[in-house]
Amino acid sequence: MRYSHPPLYQLGLDDPLPPPHMAWGPDSAAPGLVAIGGGLSVERLLEAYGQGCFPWYSEGQPVMWWSPDPRMVLPVGPFRLQRSLRQALKQFLRSPGAQVRFDTAFPEVIQACASAPRPGQNGTWIVRDIVKAYEQLHLAGHAHSIEVWLGNKLMGGLYCVAIGRAVFGESMFSRQSNASKIALAALVGFARAQGVALIDCQQKTSHLASLGACDMSRAEFLMHTTIALAQPSLEWKFDPLYWLELQIEPMAQ
């Protein structure tokens, strides 16, 4: 197959990202690629997420910025717990020491996500520079961890980026069956209670689709993001009452 090759923007540290509509199209070798380079400073990451872009690349490659079209998103309103997950969540909440926490172990969560095996992948896109950059973004108040604990053991979780009321999911991991799904359910309950309409999932996977994620055009996603960015920041603290948003009675926290 012969692909078309539009211009590839190579960014210096002070160069602005090109607008997302300049991303390579579906007939190119890398659909959704916007630019390469430019570093991973907190300012660069906030600029990128603010216009619907995110970094994704492998060790040894330059920083690559993407804005896929369509975009996979998880609407929090229609989210429904699958029967198996509902039972797993109820069992978790009955367990002694079961707790969901936000932002108490961000470095451990992102490292666990980087180390988690991915079906069909030999490596990870959460390379060392990504870990360092998102730890800085966490310290700046814009990257957050959702953690599933049993006693003093971290069983699973995920991390995300948030600006205003725009929430961008990044990666998840499990050390126990369903732990990452419980973390996602906790994020959805929190998002409903805080007035977040959807969670960005970036790229399409069958796993996310099974949980209710769906495609959204880039134009519609950017419209949503622009509105959400202008809203007040979220209060990143988990309250067990958020389980009621999912029609689950809080029991053990």
Image (tube, helix red, strand yellow):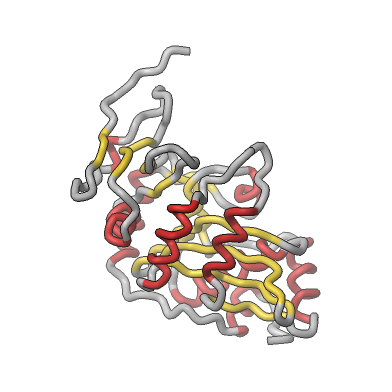
Q: Is residue 78 above or below residue 208?
A: below
Residue at 23% in and 48% down: 13
Q: In the rendered view, does 168 fall on the left or right side of 124?
A: left
Residue at 35% in and 66% down: 163
The quadrant of the image that shows the C terminus is bottom right
Can you tell which quarter of the image residue 110 is in? bottom right
Residue 121 location (% of width, % of height) = 63, 39
Can you tell which quarter of the image residue 122 is in? top right
Q: Tell which of 182 and 39 is nearer to you.
A: 39
Residue 46 location (% of width, % of height) = 31, 59
Q: Is residue 67 above or below residue 253?
A: above
Q: In the rendered view, does 186 fall on the left or right side of 228?
A: right
Q: Is residue 123 above or below residue 187?
A: above
Can you tell which quarter of the image residue 238 is in? bottom right
Residue 61 location (% of width, % of height) = 43, 37
Residue 99 location (% of width, % of height) = 67, 80
Q: In the rendered view, does 227 fall on the left or right side of 96?
A: left
Residue at 50% in and 71% down: 191
Q: Tell which of 157 and 126 is nearer to you.
A: 126
